[in-house]
Image (spheres, rainbow, N blue to C red):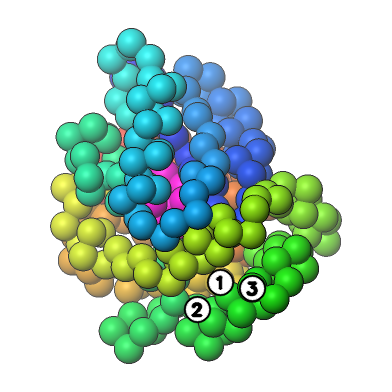
Amino acid sequence: MTAPRLILITGWGFCASALASLKASLTQRWPDLDVQLEALPALATDNVNNWCEALEQRIDANGDTQDRPLWIGGWSLGGMLASRLVERAPQRFAGLITLASNARFSACNEWPQALDAPIFDDFCARFQHNPKATRQRFALLCSQGSEQRSLISTLRTHLYDAPDAIGEAGLQLLAQLDNRAVLATLARPQLHLFSECDALVPVSAAAAFAGLGNTRLDTEILAGSHAFPIEAPEPLAARIAAFIQHPKRHS
């Protein structure tokens, strides 16, 4: 097959460099795979269309002239935005891959398989009061459940020191996004990877995704924390590469 292009969007609070080890593992396994890492847009608005348009402009700017299948994915908020990009232009993308990314980040009665709303509200309030300390705490939450003691230090080296208004806008976006209907209707192969010990996206979300009724949607649970793309890039790279090469086996 023609080697595809894969765009991976990072999660809230982190630079694109957080996914560098995953990119290295992917290219080591599949040297012809063109992996492009993208940071979240530096926008002080919670309008999802503006965020998607900013990402689409980057994709256009970094496009190549080869006829390569284009896959897109992301970690946490990055995966939620990647889902919206496929919804906006399904003909453009070969498929979707998300990493520790929920359909809704904050729980509601119809989707309890998410972070408890009071916990998320408390986090947002902490960010407004002390953004720097809250970013540090977020790295700790992402590493919770990992057996790697050094993971928290690694994550903190990749924290994105964005202006507070941009961080706040990202949190507001997380509070608003609801991709249940999007994921249920996408006519492209989807792989949604969850981790066993994720403190931010309950592992029960995997079964809830499967219950959306989309036959093109596949889920899998891997070991690790919310930061499993940084914690264990090699097995994750193997799973991603296998899905891109043979998506029909999993749909």
Residue 92 position within the rendered picture, expressed as x and y whole percent measured from the top left: 23, 32
Hey, what amino acid is under mark 2?
A: Leu
Residue name at image x 53 percent, y 19 percent: 31
In the drawing, does residue 56 fall left or right of residue 10?
left
Tell me which numbered mark, 3 or 2, is placed earlier along the sequence: 2
Vertical position of residue 235 compared to residue 210: above or below = above
* Picture layout, residue 83 above or below residue 21: below
User: Left or right of 19: which side holds 216?
Assistant: left
Helix, strand or loop for disc 3: helix
Tell me whether the residue at label 2 lies in contact with that at label 1, contact meaning CB atoms closer than 8 angstroms. Answer: yes
Q: Which residue is mark 2?
A: 115
Q: Point out residue 60 in the picture as x, y percentages from the top left corner.
A: 35, 25
Which residue matches tag 3?
128
Q: Quadrant of residue 223?
A: bottom right
Question: Taking 5 as reference, is 249 left or right?
Answer: left
Residue in the foreground of this view, choosing between 14 and 129 = 129
Q: CA distance from mark 3 to mark 1?
A: 19 Å
The part of the image, by quadrant, that contains residue 144 is bottom right
Q: Is residue 52 visible?
A: yes
Instruction: Give, as a single range, the part of the protein colored magenta.
Output: 73-81
